[in-house]
Image (cartoon, grey):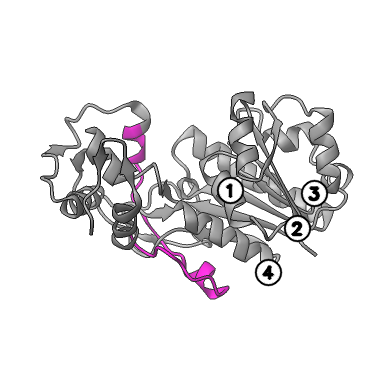
């Protein structure tokens, strides 16, 4: 039986997940906060629903009744997860046909481990408020799954990039920076691997926590330098992190330093399409095109 898939938060990652299920699902629905995005969702095979996190429309509530597979990617707020809050954590009543849930979280829940490796069994001590709320939401979804006797997969995502959101485009639009903070590394994940991992875990109705992240935690300046090499341009000058002008949110990312393992996901049989940033950027350099500013052929 093909799934009836409902995606709460059909944004960048949610739309990639929907695309991965085109032709594989009986029906795909997705929520957005803006009616202006309805046409784009419809054109990609997604039935759109308005959802602002405070109310459930009759149409959305009806769609929930026949949903068999659920992906929740909307960030929690101070009051917790918006969907669970509205349904009182009662998945059975509001999703009677449900068979599997994916909750998209973040590796930010691990906090700072001073560059050490972490896996799904590592201690979590998140630093930012947004990561603290994500960890609370993870627990809420896991508990709701136990109460409803449903498998819930928690997907902890690292830094997301892909078409329209990558170092190559940042170089072209002049926003790329090479910030230097000795010892700092980040993991990344291509949006197509988020979609692929979701489809894979859904096929196995897997439950538990999975780090959805690439093989190679690397200094951020190395990614920019490699993108510049692909484009045949000079990379931007190095900037000392301590004196660089950054937004509070951007600076907060550098307060967490860790290497995130994806071994558990691989053990389920998932094979990454883009296991490292070099593989991904080579692909993006061949496919990205900006009006009036085409990328050089590779």
Read off the residue under disc 3. 67
Left or right of 157 on screen, residue 178: left
Q: Position of residue 256 (x, y in %)?
A: 36, 45
Say which of 212 and 164 sits in front: 164
Labels 3, 1: front one: 3
Magenta range is 250-276
- Residue 174 is one of the magenta-drawn residues: no
- Locate the C terminus by quadrant: bottom left
Who is closer to the viewer here, 246 or 295? 295
Which residue position is annotated with label 1?
A: 104
Where residue 31 sits: x, y (%)?
67, 35
As measured in the structure, the alpha-carbon distance from the residue carrying label 3 to the one carrying label 1 is: 18 Å
Pointer 4 residue: 204
Residue 3 badge? 2
Q: Residue at x 82, y 58 (%)?
A: 149
Q: Earlier in the sequence, mark 3 or mark 4?
A: 3
For label 2, the crowd category at 10 Å Cα-Cα, with few meaning under 14, some 14 to 19 and many 20 or more, is many
Upstream in sequence: badge 4 or badge 2: 2
Q: CA distance from mark 2 to mark 3?
A: 8 Å
Contact, mark 3 vs mark 4 (Cβ under 8 Å):
no
Label 1 residue SS: strand
Q: For the image shown, how many numbered marks are present on the structure?
A: 4
- Left or right of 285 on screen, residue 33: right
Give the SS element for disc 4.
loop
**Residue 2 visible to the viewer:** yes
Counting other residues with Cα less than 10 Å from the Cα at mark 3, is it few (<14), some (14-19), or many (20 or more)?
Answer: many
Residue 110 is situated, as x and y percent measured from the top left of the image, at 47, 50
């Amino acid at each position: 039986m093909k799934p009836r898939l409902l995606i709460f938060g059909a944004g960048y990652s949610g739309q990639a997940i929907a695309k991965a299920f085109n032709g594989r699902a009986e029906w795909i629905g997705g929520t957005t906060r803006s009616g202006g995005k309805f046409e784009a969702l419809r054109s990609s095979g997604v039935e759109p629903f308005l959802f602002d996190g405070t109310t459930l429309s009759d149409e959305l509530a009806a769609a929930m009744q026949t949903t068999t597979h659920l992906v929740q990617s909307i960030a929690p707020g101070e009051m917790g997860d918006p969907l669970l809050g509205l349904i009182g954590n009662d998945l059975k009543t509001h999703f009677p046909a449900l068979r599997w849930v994916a909750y998209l979280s973040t590796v930010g829940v691990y906090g700072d481990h001073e560059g050490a490796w972490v896996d799904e069994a590592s201690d979590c001590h998140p630093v930012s408020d947004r990561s603290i709320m994500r960890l609370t939401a993870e627990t809420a979804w896991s508990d709701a799954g136990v109460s409803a006797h449903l498998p819930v997969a928690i997907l902890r995502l690292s830094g997301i990039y892909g078409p329209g959101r990558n170092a190559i485009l940042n170089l072209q639009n002049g926003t790329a920076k090479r910030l230097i903070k000795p010892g700092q590394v980040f993991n990344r994940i291509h949006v197509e691997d988020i979609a692929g991992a979701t489809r894979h875990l859904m096929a196995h109705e897997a439950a538990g926590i999975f780090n959805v992240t690439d093989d190679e935690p690397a200094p951020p300046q190395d990614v920019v330098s490699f993108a510049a090499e692909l484009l045949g341009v000079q990379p931007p000058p190095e900037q000392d992190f301590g004196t660089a002008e950054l937004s509070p949110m951007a600076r907060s990312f550098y307060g967490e330093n860790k290497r995130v393992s994806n071994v558990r996901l691989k053990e389920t049989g998932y094979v990454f399409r883009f296991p490292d940033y070099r593989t991904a950027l080579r692909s993006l350099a061949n496919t990205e095109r900006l009006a009036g500013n085409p990328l050089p052929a590779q």
